[in-house]
Image (cartoon, rainbow, N blue to C red):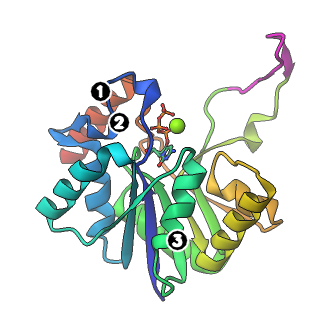
Amino acid sequence: MSTGVVIVAAGSGKRMGGQRNKLWLPLAGEPILAHTVRLFATHPDIDEVVLVVSEADHAEVMTLISAEKLMVVITMGGAERQDSVRNGLASLSANCDYVLVHDAARPFVTRKQISDMIKQVQQDQATIMAVPVKDTIKVVGVNGLVESTPARESLWAVQTPQAFRMSLLREAHQAAGEAGKLGTDDAMLVEWLGHPVSIMQGSYENIKITTPDDLWFGEEILRKRKG
Ligand code: CTP
Ligand code: MG
């Protein structure tokens, strides 16, 4: 049984508002990207790592990976996250039975959560990390008025990693590509095939670093973990 991971890092970090990809911003003195890649590349349950980057970051990523002596295959991203994942999948070897897809912008997933997810995907074929939403969520129309309020008990905020049987995720990406459909996560593409997707309860610490306020929260998470 072999498991690969596709780490997508080919965004530009617009919502962070900086000059370059947010993944170069420091967290405990090191780029966010370094934290995430090291976590997966040194994980005993992960056999292959594909890192998807943009043209603009390629040279610097190569320097980082070789300085750390990590076993990572680097490939190029696309305009949308879905394009980046598809490119990443194409770079994983045919040996992989299962694949995890992970946002480089989520450096706080734990080793144990990764191991648990690999166990769960072997049973369920498609499983995603998520947490129950804390806020009441409203559906709002283009006129700015509330249309409805879904029952909070049924709402989960979805994170990565998301894990799939490799053949299932490849099929899902191919089908979405042929239909010209763009999903906001990988599970959505699998749902479109009519395949069940299970939830693995994640943690509220597994944030995606998106806006500047996430940086100080991230520093606090690391400080707390160091003890
Ligand atoms: N990503 C990617 N390829 C894209 C877009 C996003 O690989 N074309 C990656 C990002 O690098 C990130 C992850 O997908 O690790 C989640 O995306 P997000 O947090 O939205 O990052 P960005 O798209 O870079 O940020 P923004 O949406 O604010 O521009
Ligand atoms: Mg984005």
**Residue 162 shows in the view:** no
Gap between marks 3 and 2 measured at Cα? 24 Å
Q: Residue tagged by mark 3?
A: 90
For ligand 1, tell me if the residue under mark 2 lies within 8 Å.
yes
Q: Residue tagged by mark 2?
A: 21
Indicate whether 189 appears above or below 220. below
Q: Residue at x 49, y 82 (%)?
A: 96
Query: 64 and 177: which one is in front?
Result: 177
Q: Residue at x 21, y 60 (%)?
A: 65
- Magenta: predominant secondary structure element? loop
In the rendered structure, find residue 216 and report the number of the disc placed on it. 1
Residue 64: x and y in percent read 18, 54
- Dot 3 falls on a residue whose secondary structure is helix
Judged from this view, the residue extending furthest toward the front is 55
Q: Residue at x 17, y 55 (%)?
A: 63
The C terminus: image quadrant:
top left
- Dot 1 falls on a residue whose secondary structure is helix
Range of magenta residues: 136-147
Residue 173: x and y in percent read 67, 64
- Dot 2 falls on a residue whose secondary structure is loop
Indicate whether 124 appears above or below 185. below
Which badge, 3 or 2, is on the more N-terminal residue?
2
State left or right for residue 130 relative to residue 178: left
Indicate whether 185 appears above or below 146. below
Residue 146 located within the stretch drawn in magenta: yes
Which badge, 2 or 1, is on the more N-terminal residue?
2
- Report crowding for label 2: few under 14, some 14 to 19, many 20 or more residues within 10 A (C-alpha): some
Amino acid at circle 3: Ala
**Residue 150 shows in the view:** yes
Residue 214: x and y in percent read 38, 29
Amino acid at circle 2: Asn
